[in-house]
Image (cartoon, rainbow, N blue to C red):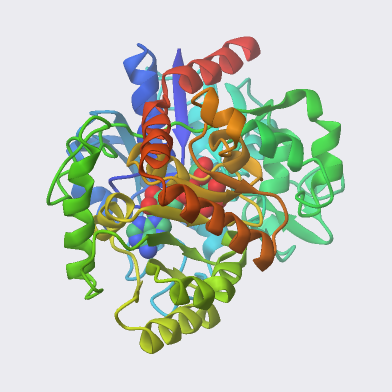
Amino acid sequence: MRILYVTSEAFPLIKTGGLADVSGSLPAAFRHLGEDVRLLIPGYPQVLSKLRNTRPLLDLKWLPMVGNVRLVLGEMPETGVPVIAVDLPQLYVRDGGPYLDPQGHEWADNPLRFGTLSRIAAILASKASPLSDWIPDVVHCNDWQCGLTPAYMHYSGSPCAKSVLGVHNLAFQGNFPAEWVDRLGLPHEGFSINGFEYYGQLSFLKAGVFYSDSIATVSPTYAHEIQTAEYGFGLQGLLATRSKDIHGILNGIDTDEWDPAQDAHLPQTYDSRSLNKKEAVKLALQQRLSLNQDADVPLLGVVSRLTSQKGLDLFLKCAVPLLDQGCQIAVLGGGDPALEQGFLQLAHAHPQQVSVTIGYNEPLSHLIMAGTDIFIMPSRFEPCGLNQMYGLRYGTPPVVRRTGGLADSVHNTTATSLANNSANGFVFDLPNTKELLTTIQRALSSYGNKVEWRQIQQNGMAVDLSWDHSAQEYLNIYRSLM
Ligand code: ADP
Ligand code: GLC
C-alpha cells in the first residue's frame, strides 16, 4: 500500500510535542510492516539539514500566492523512511518555531504556510499527480495544519487517494478570517455549514472533519469524548454525524528512543530486573538540578507544555503540602507565562526541594523521566498523551486524570489490580486539587511499601507500548477504504 503521511512536525527533524513523536514513529512502523510510506513535511531549516540523501524530486508550477515550489526527497535519520520536504524558503525558512515567531506569536501567514502544505498533499494525492511514478492509495493528514487536504482533494476534479484525518488535538482548529478562502484558492461553494465554514471563518480542522473519508483520533476514549459538548470544542455536532467513520487508536511509542536499557541520555541504564540501578539516575538528576541528594525522598516529575490542557495549575496548588511532607519536585516545561511564573516562584521559595527548568530540553526530559519516582499528569483533556507511557516504560508510575489516552493507558492501583498485576499507576476522576492531592498521597503511600512499589513499576514496564498493534489497526482502516 502507498501511504502519504502529511505532518507539520516529525521527530527527530523538528518537534514541539507529541505529534512529532507519532509522525516519527508510526510511518517507521508501517515501513517495518512492508508498506510503501512517505512523509510530506514543510522544509524548515532543521528538516533540510537533518534529512539524509536529499535530492530534487519535482518542481510544481505556480501555486497561488507562492509561485513555483520545489519538492525534495530525502530519508529520515535512523529509520530511513522516505520524506518529501517542501523546499519553499519564503514560507518555511525563518527564525522561530514551526508555528510561532521568536516572540511566541503565531506567524501571520500560517494559513498560507499550512494551506500550501495541504494543497501540495492534495496534488500528490491525485491520480493525475505530476509525481506519476508514486501515486498514493491513502493520504493520512494530521491536525488542522493539514486539514485542508481533503477539501482540496474534493474540489480537485480528479479521482484521488482515500483520505484519513488524524486528530491529535481538537483544541487547535486553525480558524482564520474568511478572506483566506479566496487567497488559498478554495471555491466559495465550500464556504458553508456543509463545508469549511465555521461561524463565519475558514476552519482548517473542520474542513478535514467534513471532507475526509475517515477520521482517526489517538485513543479510544478520546474518540468518544470528542463527540460530546465537554470535549468537542464546538465540533461535537459535526463529529457525531460522522460517528461511524471515527476510529480511536491508541498511540504507540518509539521503544528504541525511549528505552531505559539503552538510553544514551542517562548516566546509568537499567531494566525491569535491575530497577535498583534507577537510584543512580535519581541521584544524578538531583545533583544536576541542585536538589538535596537523597535517594529516599519521593521525587515527583513533570515534563509538559504548561497550558491549561495539562492541569498543572492544580499540581501547583497542591505543591506546598507535598513539600511539607518532604517530597521533591522537578519540572521541565514552558508555555503559559502565569504558570511558568508560579512554578518559578515555588522553586525560589524551596530551592532544595523544587527545580523548575523553563524551555524545551530533550536530554533533560529523558533524565527526568528516568530519575524521578512518580510522574504527574493531571490533564483536563488528553487526546492520547505520551509522557505517561514514557513514565510506565521508565519505571516511573504516573498519576493521571481519567481522560482520553490517559484513561486507556494507565491502570489505577487497587487491591484488585495489584492482585492481578495490572496496577501500573494512579488515576483520579475530577479535575480538582483535592482529588489530585489525595491521589498523589495514595501514590506516596504505595511508594513507602517497597515490595508493592516494585510490583507497580514492573507492571508498567511490562506493558507493550510499541506500535505493533496500533500500526496494524491503521492499515486495517486504510484497507477498508480502498
Ligand atoms: P502534547 O503533544 O500534548 O504536548 P504528549 O504527551 O503527547 O503531549 O507529548 C509531549 C512530547 O513533548 C513528549 O515527547 C514530551 O517528552 C515532549 N516535551 C514536552 N515538553 C517538553 C520540554 N519542555 N522539553 C522536552 N520535551 C518536552
Ligand atoms: C497532541 C495531544 C497529545 C497526543 C499527541 C500525539 O499533542 O495533546 O495528547 O499524545 O498529540 O498524538
Query: Can you give x and y, in whole percent of width and height, for residue 137 in the image?
Result: 52, 17
Residue found 50% across the figure and 33% down from its top = 251
Q: Nearer the viewer, residue 47 or 70?
A: 47
Q: Quadrant of ligand 1?
A: bottom left
Q: How many marks?
A: 0
- Rendered position, 461 above or below 332: above
In this view, the residue in front, 391 or 435, is 435
Taking the spot 57% from the left edge, 44% from the top edge, the residue there is 168
Q: Position of residue 132 (x, y in %)?
A: 41, 20
Residue 215 percent coordinates (x, y): 67, 31
Residue beneath the point at 12% across and 51% down: 267
What residue is shown at x 55% (from left), y 46% (from top)?
426
Question: Viewed as shown, does residue 170 lie left or right of 66?
Answer: right
Q: Is residue 470 above or below residue 218?
A: above
Let me know if residue 145 appears in the view: no
Q: Relative to residue 47, is residue 126 depicted above or below? A: above
Left or right position of 180 against 168 = right
Q: From the viewer's perspective, is 79 left or right of 61? A: left
Q: Which quadrant is home to the C terminus?
A: top right
